[in-house]
Image: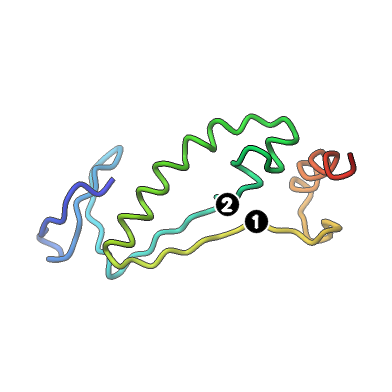
Amino acid sequence: MITEAVPTQSRPADFALDARPHPFALNPSTSAVLVVDMQNDFGAEGGMFARAGIDISMIRRAVGPTASVIAAARRCGMPIVYLKMAFKPDLSDAGPADRVTTEGLNKWKRE
C-alpha cells in the first residue's frame, strides 16, 4: 500500500511503501504495475472456475486490493500492464499441467 509520497535519500520522487517483511521505496517514473490473470473466467461468479465448482473466494478477496493498487498507480502516472492467460480453442498451445486443468474445466462447455 502506498502510504504517502515522501522524499528519500535515494531519489526525491520515491514513495514509501508499507510492505512486508520490510517497507521499501518505489520510484513511479521507473516502475510499472503488472496485473496477472485478473480475468472473469478465474474470479467472477459465472466464470469458468465458478461454473466448474472451483472455490473462487480467495481470488475474489484479491480484487479490492488490486483495484486500490491500480488506482494509486494511475494517480502516480505509472504504467499498468495486464497479462492474460489464453489458449487456442483446441488447447494445442497449453502445456501438460494446463491441459489437466483445462480438460476438467471443459466439461461445463459441453453441458
* Residue that sits furthest to the bottom in the current view: 29
Percent across and percent down for residue 68 are 35, 48
Q: Which residue is mark 1?
A: 85
Q: What element does badge 1 sit on?
A: loop
**Is residue 71 toward the left or the right of residue 90 in the image?**
left
Q: Disc 2 residue type?
A: Asp
**Is residue 43 toward the left or the right of residue 97 in the image?**
left
* Alpha-carbon span between mark 2 and mark 1: 6 Å
Count all numbered tags in the image, as a single digit: 2
* Residue that sits furthest to the right in the current view: 110
**Residue sitting at x 23%, y 50%:** 24
Q: Disc 1 residue type?
A: Met
Rate crowding at label 2 as few (under 14), some (14 to 19) or many (20 or more) other CA atoms within 10 Å: some
Q: What element does badge 2 sit on?
A: loop
Q: Which mark is residue 18?
A: none
Rate crowding at label 1 as few (under 14), some (14 to 19) or many (20 or more) other CA atoms within 10 Å: few
Between 20 and 109, the one lying in front of the other is 109
**Residue sitting at x 10%, y 59%:** 7
Q: Which mark is residue 37?
A: 2
Percent across and percent down for residue 27 are 24, 63
Mark 2 touching mark 1, by CB under 8 A?
A: yes
Between 46 and 88, the one lying in front of the other is 46
**Residue sitting at x 14%, y 63%:** 10
Percent across and percent down for residue 70 are 38, 55
**Is residue 50 toward the left or the right of residue 4 in the image?**
right
**Is residue 107 toward the left or the right of residue 97 in the image?**
right
Between 110 and 17, the one lying in front of the other is 110
> Image quadrant for the N terminus?
top left
